[in-house]
Image: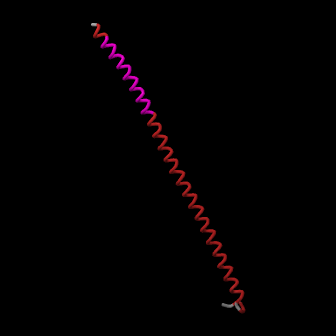
Amino acid sequence: MLIELITMSKIKRMDVRFGEISNMMDKQDAMIASLQERRSQRVSNARRQEKLRFQAMNVDVKIFCMRFIKVSRDEQLTMLIKRINYLPNGKL
């Protein structure tokens, strides 16, 4: 009888300890899931920001190209007008 009480008491303490361990594991699993979610959000935010930077860079490149083309076209027209002005009687 005494042995049974001691055994039952040990079993109850073990159950309580296993319950505590189980609770700690559940908390740890929840923390890991939260960290993984934050990491995936950071990765998606980084990808989104990289995409926006790339789009902004493309816009800047397009604007630069358009300005360069306009300037070179204006320079070519200016040179053509100067050449025409230097021709005798303005004839080609």
Query: In the rendered structure, does residue 9 fall within the stretch colored magenta?
Result: yes
Q: Position of residue 64 (x, y in %)?
A: 61, 66
Above or below — where is 15 with respect to 71? Answer: above
Q: Residue furthest bottom?
A: 88
Decide whether the magenta segment is chiefly helix, strand or loop. Answer: helix
Which quadrant would residue 91 be assigned to in this image? Answer: bottom right
Residue 82 or 7: which is nearer the viewer? 7
Q: Residue at x 53, y 53 (%)?
A: 50
Above or below — where is 62 with respect to 10? Answer: below
Q: Residue at x 35, y 19 (%)?
A: 14
Q: Position of residue 72 (x, y in %)?
A: 63, 75
Residue 18 or 42: which is nearer the viewer? 18
Residue 3 or 85: which is nearer the viewer? 3
Above or below — where is 90 with respect to 41? Answer: below
Above or below — where is 91 with respect to 6? Answer: below
Q: Residue at x 69, y 83 (%)?
A: 81
Q: Is 40 left or right of 52, judged from the image as shown?
A: left
Q: Position of residue 18 (x, y in %)?
A: 36, 23
Q: Residue at x 49, y 44 (%)?
A: 41
Q: Position of residue 33 (x, y in %)?
A: 44, 37
Q: Image quadrant for the N terminus?
A: top left
Query: In the rendered structure, does residue 19 fall within the stretch colored magenta?
Result: yes
Which quadrant would residue 6 be assigned to in this image? Answer: top left
Q: Which residues are magenta?
A: 6-30
Which quadrant would residue 66 be assigned to in this image? Answer: bottom right
